[in-house]
Amino acid sequence: MAEYWFYHLEASTLEGVLPDLLEKTMSRGWRALVKLPQARIDEMDHYLWTYQDASFLPHGRDDEPMADQQPVLLSSKAAASEGVDCVFLIDGEEMEITDQTQRCIVMINGRSQDDIGRARKLWKRLKDAGETLSYWQQTDRGKWEKKA
């Protein structure tokens, strides 16, 4: 059964924290799926190749060859988390989380009331279903503090 971790961005943007979270995921030997709206796929794909001058984050898109072999997979269409250990849900995206998935990370844009509202509804639904939840809020210095 997956754990659900909610990350509430306050001081940083998604681009400011996602690469580090993905690197930590890969350091555990886990395969990750980042589900985000189709309109953001190209931008995130480019960003993960170029976010640092000295390195890049190995990844692929689900609409490219050998997608099933990528350590980090970007998708707007995945309906279930089959074949991955960790899922990142961006901009209110949702999907079925299968038994083999260890963790589902819900990224919350603290500057968007719509995103906050969607995350609250998802939290309530998951809590009512008896899922394991934790909530992490970013401090004004960018550190993560566990609140629930």
Image (cartoon, rainbow, N blue to C red):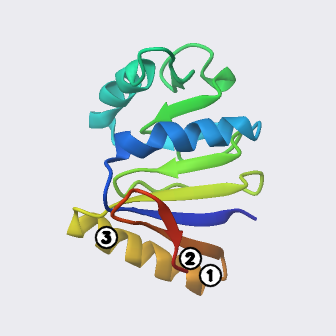
Helix, strand or loop at disc 3? Answer: helix
Q: Is residue 63 left or right of residue 80?
A: left
- State which tag comes first along the sequence, 2 or 3: 3
Question: In this orientation, which residue lies closer to the viewer: 112 or 82?
Answer: 112
Circle 1 residues within 10 Å: few <14, some 14–19, many ≥20: few
Q: Which residue is mark 3?
A: 116
Residue name at image x 22 percent, y 63 percent: 112
- State which tag comes first along the sequence, 3 or 1: 3
The amino acid at mark 2 is: Leu
Question: Which numbered marker is on residue 126?
Answer: 2
Circle 3 residues within 10 Å: few <14, some 14–19, many ≥20: some
Q: Is residue 56 above or below residue 16?
A: above
* Coordinates of residue 35 in the picture (x, y in percent): 46, 43
Give the number of callouts. Answer: 3
Q: How far, Cα to Cα, is label 1 from label 2? A: 5 Å
Name which quarter of the figure residue 72 lies in. Answer: top right
The amino acid at mark 3 is: Ile
* Coordinates of residue 106 in the picture (x, y in percent): 48, 59
Name which quarter of the figure residue 109 lies in. Answer: bottom left
The amino acid at mark 1 is: Ala
Residue name at image x 51 percent, y 69 percent: 145
The quarter of the image holding the C terminus is: bottom right
Name which quarter of the figure residue 28 lies in. Answer: top right
Q: How far, Cα to Cα, is label 3 from label 1? A: 20 Å
Q: Is residue 119 left or right of residue 82?
A: left
* Coordinates of residue 142 in the picture (x, y in percent): 40, 56
**Tags 1 and 2 in contact by the CB under 8 Å rule?**
yes
Q: Nearer the viewer, mark 3 or mark 1?
A: 3
Helix, strand or loop at disc 2? Answer: helix
Question: In this orientation, which residue lies closer to the viewer: 63 or 42?
Answer: 42
Question: Which numbered marker is on residue 129?
Answer: 1
